[in-house]
Image (cartoon, helix red, strand yellow):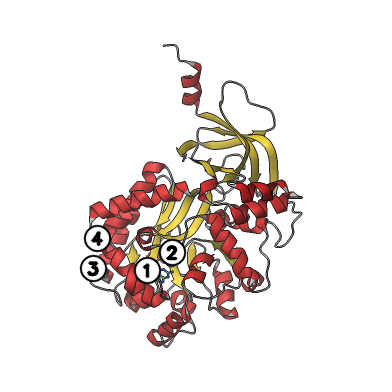
Amino acid sequence: MIETTDAAVRAAGRHALRGDLLDFPSQPVWGELDSDAVRFLPDHWLLIEQGRIVGTQAEAPDDSWMRHDHRGCLILPGFIDTHVHAPQLDVIASFGTELLDWLNTYTFPAEQRYADPLIARQGAERFMDALLAHGTTAAVVFPTVHKVAAQALFEAAQARGMRLIAGKVLMDRHAPEGLRDDVAQAERDCVDLIDRFHGRGRLAYAVTVRFAPTSTPAQLAMAGALCRADASLYMQTHVAENRAEVAWVAQLFPDARSYLDVYDREGLLHPKAVLAHGIWLDDADRQALAGRGAQLAFCPSSNLFLGSGLFDWGAARRAGVQVSAASDVGGGTSLSMQKTLADAYKVQSLQGQRLDAWSALYTATHGAAKALGLDGEIGHFGRGAVADVCVWHWAVGGVAQARMERVRNLHEKVFAWLTLSDERNLVSAWVAGRERFRP
Ligand code: GUN
Ligand code: ZN
């Protein structure tokens, strides 16, 4: 059978995307605007073969490539959101509370609905589609305590070819009926989910302790044992987000040196641990995080919205703690990583620190991948990386267009883009070399 050229090209899986390519082969130095870590290739072609990046070039590739001409657009690695709650899309933008009230008033009731397999599946699909529609191609996600919700999330990610790190939420106290597990059943659920999903395709399992107050010491010990038994497992939780929460943890765990120490004592801090917030930590905590190789997920939108506090990125950096950026929806008010990073700039600004566009974008791409041990796979345009790629308009609307006409250098342009853009700028999102979203 003679194939048409188009069909033959599709069969070879060769795609070439034209636009202004921007990625970060190495970590930019904080505050350095003229940085060697920035790779900007204006009006170049990004070559993708069989789902992986195979190169970049200035000249148009030959007819053996499907050419996608996005000249005049910005092309970035897909964003990585290192902390977000799938079921909380249902309560995003809820009025008037701080963390502990917000959990009881809005979040727990919303999560109770995910015991129903149909609601869990529809919610998981809506959530994964929403990530893609915001240019996020990989994420570290909390579902709910229900096994069906974790399973639905893994299946929704698998169906879209997306990189997902997730796990059933562990919570066996201080939560309402329908949201509590127990140690033995939780362990069985974790073991079964690990067997079925961990390392399957682009999925990985995270032992998911909601936060210290909702797990008994016995459950924390079980979670630690799972991590010790398999160093390839991730761990995700919350730490030191809100002052009332910190005081409550001190009451519940009087023997612990600090909130973070509750996790450290159980072996939950390791290079695959992602801890959200870390606002109310001290230097000994930061030393412990750096020593264990665990990372903090900075969630500026959530921290502002819930009035939690200002994360001190400078102190984390000085201690050598790895920091990624995260939306923390529904505490955060948008899945957009540009909005998240623009809020990050403002939170640092309130503390006299200035987050440059290079450090910001690195944090949400290559930096997050590196902290997760996934830099061989995602976060950059290096040869062999999986082609998770997003194409963006440089400007949408008159204000952004006028601003773009007045930028004087590359940093100014990218910083203005980061501050003024959001999901409305997205032209297309590619996952493993397939276009999966176009508005
Ligand atoms: N701490 C415990 N659970 C949560 C949650 O769902 N969101 C946030 N922001 N903090 C938490
Ligand atoms: Zn959270």
The mark that comes first in sequence, 2 or 3, is: 3
Q: Which residue type carries mark 1? A: Ala
Vertical comparison of 289 with 118: above or below: below
Please say if the residues under marks 4 and 3 sit with CB atoms less than 8 Å apart: yes
Residue at mark 4: 115
Question: Which secondary structure lies at badge 1?
Answer: helix
Please say if the residues under marks 2 and 1 sit with CB atoms less than 8 Å apart: yes
Please tell me in which quarter of the rendered image ligand 2 is found.
bottom left
Please say if the residues under marks 3 and 1 sit with CB atoms less than 8 Å apart: no
Residue 175 position, x and y percent, is 29, 74
Q: Which mark is residue 140?
A: none
Residue at mark 1: 223
Q: Report how far apart the C-alphas of labels 2 and 1 lie in the structure.
A: 9 Å
Q: Which mark is residue 178?
A: 3
Residue density around tag 1, few if under 14, some if 14–19, many if 20 or more, within 10 Å? many
The mark that comes first in sequence, 4 or 3, is: 4
Q: Nearer the viewer, residue 64 or 76?
A: 76
Residue 120 position, x and y percent, is 28, 54
Q: Which mark is residue 235?
A: 2
Q: Is mark 4 within 8 Å of ligand 1?
A: no
Vertical comparison of 51 with 422: above or below: above
Residue at 49% over, 56% down: 81
State which quadrant residue 348 falls in: bottom right
Vertical comparison of 93 with 157: above or below: below
The mark that comes first in sequence, 1 or 4, is: 4
